């Protein structure tokens, strides 16, 4: 998989704006969309646009907005997803799913003061290589004309806790000189963590809360399992219909 942090240095060339800046672009290409043969080199970058790295995915609907956001936060100036033409998805509705997800993601980026045009979707068929390259070049030039994204703010370092030996024992935590007094809920939290008569430590959470967390975890697991298997079954059913493996009586 191409690494966004090892892209070639910015220089004038194909896909660059008038100022000569060449952005780093990451593209996710559906296996059933435009063919990458002849337009992608061995290193995963486009031959006509070396600032664009392509990553093949089983289906455009397989993509998650969090993956696109991860690419933006790790050095990519722009991200796009290419799927089958709308209404002609090999997996029926994958391109519609990613289109709706990216629309929602662009709204969220706009609320976060990030240019939403850094993320887009394009849809081309197997033999639309020329149109695909033209669309990617236009997207690269559009991203290059944008102002550089603001660097991420560093997280403030965590305050180190100081300990002071107490009269009744060692290693008892105590606030630093002139520090704030303990929080009002600290005593209640310690009480919740007391050891019960049968020797088990009490966590402070009720049985109902623990049960709800377990139900949520099971639902999340089933959701991931069904998403992975339904896509696989849809592909098998489609291929079986083409090859005659599955026929109606």
Image (cartoon, rainbow, N blue to C red):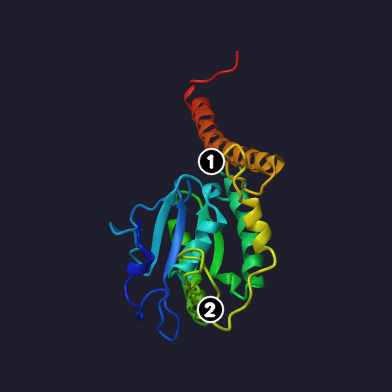
Observer-side mark, 1 or 2, equals: 2
Can residue 221 be seen here? The reply is yes
Is 171 or 58 nearer to us in this picture? 171
Is 99 on the left-hand or right-hand side of 26?
Answer: right
Q: Which residue is mark 1?
A: 90
Q: How many marks?
A: 2
Circle 2 Cα neighbour tier, 10 Å, few/some/many (<14 / 14–19 / ≥20): few
Is residue 42 positioned above or below 143 on the image? above
Residue 45, image x, y percentages: 34, 62
- Residue 145 on image: x %, y %: 51, 81
Q: Residue at x 52, y 38 (%)?
A: 228
Q: CA distance from mark 1 to mark 2?
A: 65 Å
Q: How crowded is the residue under tag 1: few (<14 C-alpha within 10 Å), some, or many (20+)? A: some
- The quarter of the rendered structure image containing the C terminus is top right
Q: Nearer the viewer, residue 6 or 88?
A: 6
Q: Which mark is residue 9?
A: none
Q: Residue 173: x and y, percent?
A: 52, 68
Residue 86 seen: no
* Residue beneath the point at 50% across and 57% down: 67
- First in sequence, mark 1 or 2: give its number: 1
172 or 247: nearer the eye? Answer: 172
Left or right of 16 on screen, residue 67: right
Q: Left or right: 39 with respect to 136? A: left
- On the image, which quarter does residue 121 sit in? bottom right
In which quadrant is the N terminus drawn?
Answer: bottom left
Image location (x, y in percent) of residue 65: 56, 57
Q: Residue at x 48, y 78 (%)?
A: 151
Q: Secondary structure at mark 2?
A: loop
- Name the residue nearer the viewer: 80 or 72: 72
Q: Quadrant of residue 101?
A: bottom right
Residue for badge 2: 176
Helix, strand or loop at mark 1: loop
């Amino acid at each position: 998989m191409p690494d966004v942090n090892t892209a070639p240095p910015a220089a004038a060339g194909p896909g660059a704006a008038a100022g000569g800046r060449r952005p780093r672009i990451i593209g996710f290409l559906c296996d059933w969309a435009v063919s990458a043969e002849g337009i992608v080199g061995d290193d995963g970058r486009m031959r006509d646009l070396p600032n664009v790295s392509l990553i093949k995915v089983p289906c455009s609907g397989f993509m998650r907005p969090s993956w696109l956001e991860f690419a933006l936060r790790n050095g990519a100036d722009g991200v796009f997803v290419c799927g089958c033409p709308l209404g002609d998805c090999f997996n029926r509705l994958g391109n519609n799913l990613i289109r709706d997800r990216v629309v929602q993601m662009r709204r969220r980026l706009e609320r976060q003061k990030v240019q939403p045009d850094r993320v887009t979707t394009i849809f081309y068929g197997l033999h639309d290589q020329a149109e695909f390259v033209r669309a990617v070049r236009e997207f690269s030039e559009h991203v290059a004309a944008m102002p550089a994204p603001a660097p991420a703010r560093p997280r403030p370092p965590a305050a180190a806790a100081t300990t002071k030996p107490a009269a009744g024992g060692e290693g008892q935590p105590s606030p630093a000189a002139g520090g704030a007094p303990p929080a009002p809920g600290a005593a209640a939290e310690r009480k919740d963590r007391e050891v019960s008569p049968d020797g088990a430590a009490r966590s402070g959470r009720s049985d109902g809360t623990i049960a709800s967390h377990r139900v949520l975890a099971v639902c999340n697991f089933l959701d991931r399992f069904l998403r992975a298997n339904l896509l696989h079954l849809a592909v098998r059913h489609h291929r079986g219909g083409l090859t005659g493996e599955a026929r109606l009586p």
